[in-house]
Amino acid sequence: MSANVSNSYDQVPYDSRPRYATHPDCLATLGRLLGLSPAPVPRCRVLELGCSTGGNLFPLAESLPGSQFVGIDLSVRQIETGQKVAAALGLTNLRLQACSILDLDSSLGEFDYIIAHGVYSWVPEAVRDKLLQVCKDHLAPQGIAYISYNTYPGWYLRAGARDLMTFHTREFDDPQQKVHQARAILDYFRDIVPDQEGTWHRVLKEEAELIRPEGDYYVYHEHLEAENHPVYFTQFIEHARRHGLQYLGEAQMHTSLSIYPAEVQRTLRSISTDLIQLEQYLDFLKNRTFRRTLLVHEQLELTRTPGPEVAQTLLAVGSAKPVSETPELLSDKVEEFVNDSGATVSTNVPFAKAALTILYEQWPKPFTFEQLWHAVQTRLGAAGPQYTAEQGRGLLARSLVHLYLSGLASLHTYLTPLALQPGERPRSTPLLRLQARTGAGVTNLRHKQAELNVFDRAVLSLCDGQRDRAGLLEELIQLVTRGEIGLKREGRELTDLAEIRAALAEELTESLTRLARSLVLLAD
């Protein structure tokens, strides 16, 4: 990798966040459904190429102490920052190393899961080659590699906006000035394009809206780097095949064909000779710009149609809400369910309707298949469908697979135990308390970002399991009296100690409930 790439990340470090789709459990779940026997998540080895400061690996290493993690990045500055955090947290199962992907050799060892997020499209051809060779050489026999990359046809339009920004900023050296000018020229051209109803205006508008909430690091590395190489999906798969790797699926499987109407599915299958062609047609249909592709060794035999037997070995979690306030579970009436991202599913199958309703009511509680089967039977009662136990279990298992593929329920091989309700001595992890205290992004126990207000961050930073609620209250009173956090009632700053205590006691109870719902408190 060129020195220029290294210097750009030393100058403008990449904001290293948790990537839910890279969690070993996400990879293992899809692997299991498609016929593999991936390594158990609590005892696995994980390699991340292009790990930045380690923000994706810290929560994994902390929550999976029996697993081993290695992060590689070319930027010395980013690695040194990450090493300091890892040392402060005492993460002895995480090793961060500054080196080029080109310099990796057999001493690296074998890994069950390899992650390369935001690398493939942003490096020269030689590094792309070596990245795939590392996956081939260092993946365990049942290992899974995650590689994200920019794709055509969607990037053809985005490339025009990128070219405008790089052309305008070509004479600027200061990174902050480059980013400022890039944002400004994009906004300006969006507003002056003659055809305000045309495609080009829409492209510029969408790009401006996309980058507006993002940090400067994103604009600098996504649009202003010299290296940015989108590819068609078929080109990526051909590259992977040359290195002895085959396509497993997408890390977010619910983006596949299953979300489209039956007629569309039939037509696309009829004009596709294999899965790879089908996926390429889907990219043309979606105008896809980005993929998160999973690869495995070419000699492995895969089961392309997930069977119900595997679903019965997994944990199920769901948050899809019934559209109807009182869904009819017993009849064959079609009921619609919608998740937080707006994806919907409609079903008239009583087992599926009951399962979705129960999972929503009990979120974020994970259910084993047996627990969910018993809960569904209880909910439907004697008036439910008259199937044999084998038929009913099979129908429920198939429903879970369909809901997983549609993004309306999640299946898991392993989940970190968390508190569904705050206990008397609420406890979080050292990393979460550090993030809350420093103002960094908070990664919850499901490996996703949690949005917390200032007060909740203060409470979370104190949840070490040693303080009971009375102790937490006393600490919060000290924070208020020292002016470190404010406390108002009806717009009036509280100064009387008795008022402060009463108000904080109420706020603390509400805050702990919010923290439990944000999935940041560990189970006792």
Image: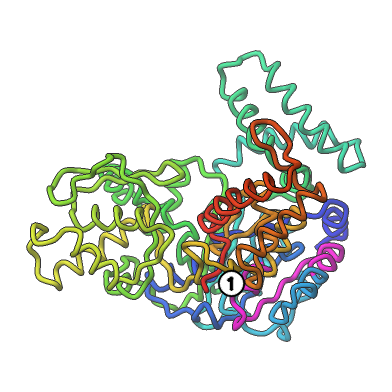
Percent x, y for residue 401?
32, 62
At a point 47% along the width and 46% down the height, the residue shown is: 283
Task: Decide whether residue 478 is among the magenta residues.
Answer: no
Q: Is residue 54 left or right of residue 155?
A: right
Percent x, y for residue 447?
57, 62
Q: Is residue 322 left or right of residue 15?
A: left
Q: Quadrant of the N terminus?
A: bottom right
Quarter of the rendering containing residue 168: top right
Seen in the picture, residue 374 relative to 179 is either above or below; the reply is below
Q: How many marks?
A: 1
Task: Write down the region rendered in magenta.
Answer: 57-82
Percent x, y for residue 104?
75, 77
| Mark 1 neighbour class, 10 Å CA radius: few under 14, some 14 to 19, many 20 or more | many
Residue identified by numbered label 1:
243
- The answer to whether residue 451 of the structure is visible from this angle is yes
Q: Nearer the viewer, residue 134 or 354?
A: 354
Percent x, y for residue 107?
73, 86
Task: Decide whether residue 74 is among the magenta residues.
Answer: yes
Please, which residue is most extreme toward the top here?
A: 194
Query: Which amino acid type corresponds to the residue marked 1 in the rendered image?
Result: His
At a point 24% along the width and 55% down the height, the residue shown is: 354
Seen in the picture, residue 199 relative to 307 is either above or below; the reply is above
Q: Nearer the viewer, residue 295 or 16?
A: 16
Quarter of the rendering containing residue 315: bottom left
- The answer to whether residue 131 of the structure is visible from this angle is no
At a point 53% along the width and 80% down the height, the residue shown is: 42
| Element marked by disc 1 | loop
